[in-house]
Image (tube, helix red, strand yellow):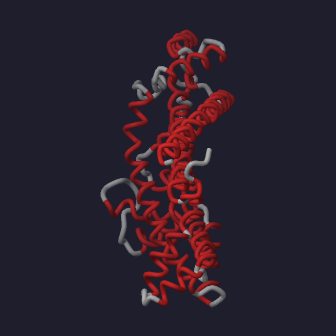
């Protein structure tokens, strides 16, 4: 029986991985089309509009921009299958090298943002569930609504003004130690914390009155252990699903947050590449962000199946 279940899980994993191919292909196609529709010529950006026509033509031929768009697209897809994302127009380096030099900063920011979201969401969600219908529940609901409603480009400068300019506690921008990641992590994790806190509250409310918790209380188990161990474990399935869906938003939301705090990650690199019409870097950044989003959803699906025995063995 266990062997059959492992076989089913392996088949499910293969099917999920196969669905990634058309998704990523669609992302690559749309990004390639949109970036070439954006007004502006990378040759003009690199040489200036006053450069000679012959120099522009030579550079355009060197970069392969004189070929038809279909040929450029086919060449780009061929390079992706070979593991080659092209060369940056601005940095004159392989795109993969440029991106992976910035990737650790973005992953660090996403990890701290996730930690901040969980630290905020779990206590608030548990408090709202235990005190449902009371003032604490209403205050938590109001806080979650405010958290969801505040955009990163507004919350970030507000935190900078308060904690950096007024109080002088934290750095304004840059990446220089733990202190510099606090404000970006709070900015990026606030919306996720608001969503997770309501999900934790809703899931806990559904299980708090179940018989197995009453039996645990009758055996003398402390109320804190009943809630934080027994109840929260069984209420975690919907939270895992929402968390997986929102993990990808940490990468996409990092674009704005990194710009606000001058954080040297993929988001900042993407904005610089868009401004400089560095097509290969733009396409590479969006591809990495999209792949991270898709794989985060896949991991959430696998975690959900692992946490819920009823889903194991299903195709």
Q: Position of residue 33 (x, y in %)?
A: 67, 28
Vertical position of residue 189 compared to residue 89: above or below: below
Q: Is residue 109 visible?
A: yes
Residue at point 44%, 88% (across, down): 219
Vertical position of residue 27 compared to residue 3: above or below: above
Residue at point 55%, 32% (across, down): 283
> What is the residue that sits farthest to the left in this orientation?
177
- Residue toward you, 215 or 240: 215
- Quick check: 241 left or right of 108? right
Q: Is residue 286 visible?
A: no
Q: Position of residue 92 (x, y in %)?
A: 41, 24
- Residue toward you, 209 or 115: 209
Residue at point 40%, 64% (across, down): 182
> What is the residue that sits farthest to the front in this orientation?
1
Q: Position of residue 217 (x, y in %)?
A: 48, 88
Vertical position of residue 75 compared to residue 232: above or below: above
- Residue toward you, 24 or 283: 24
Residue at point 62%, 30% (across, down): 25
Circle count: 0
- Quick check: 37 left or right of 111? right
Vertical position of residue 23 compared to residue 50: above or below: below
- Which quadrant would residue 119 be assigned to in this image? bottom left
Q: Position of residue 254 (x, y in %)?
A: 51, 52
Q: Quadrant of the C terminus?
A: top right
């Amino acid at each position: 029986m266990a062997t059959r279940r492992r076989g089913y899980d392996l088949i499910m994993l293969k099917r999920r991985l196969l669905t990634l191919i058309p998704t990523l292909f669609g992302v690559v196609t749309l990004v390639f089309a949109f970036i070439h529709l954006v007004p502006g010529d990378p040759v003009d950006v690199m040489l200036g509009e006053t450069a000679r026509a012959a120099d522009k033509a030579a550079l355009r031929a060197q970069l392969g921009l004189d070929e038809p768009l279909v040929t450029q697209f086919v060449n780009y897809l061929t390079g992706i299958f070979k593991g080659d994302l092209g060369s940056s127009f601005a940095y004159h380096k392989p795109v993969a090298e440029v991106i992976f030099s910035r990737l650790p900063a973005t992953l660090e920011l996403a990890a701290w943002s996730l930690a901040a979201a969980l630290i905020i969401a779990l206590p608030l969600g548990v408090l709202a569930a235990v005190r449902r219908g009371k003032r604490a529940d209403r205050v938590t609901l109001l806080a979650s609504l405010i958290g969801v409603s505040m955009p990163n480009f507004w919350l970030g400068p507000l935190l900078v003004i308060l904690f950096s300019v007024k109080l002088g506690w934290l750095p304004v921008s840059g990446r220089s130690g733990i202190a510099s990641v606090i404000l970006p992590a709070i900015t990026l994790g606030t919306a996720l914390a608001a969503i997770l806190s309501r999900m934790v509250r809703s899931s806990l409310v559904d299980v708090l009155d179940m018989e197995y918790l009453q039996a645990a209380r009758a055996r003398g188990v402390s109320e804190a252990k009943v809630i934080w161990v027994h109840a929260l474990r069984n209420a975690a399935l919907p939270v895992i699903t929402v968390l997986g869906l929102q993990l990808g938003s940490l990468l996409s939301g990092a674009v704005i947050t990194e710009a606000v705090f001058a954080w040297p990650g993929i988001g900042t690199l993407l904005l610089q590449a868009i401004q400089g019409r560095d097509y290969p870097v733009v396409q590479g950044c969006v591809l990495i962000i999209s792949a991270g989003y898709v794989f985060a959803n896949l991991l959430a699906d696998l975690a959900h199946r692992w946490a819920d025995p009823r889903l194991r063995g299903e195709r």
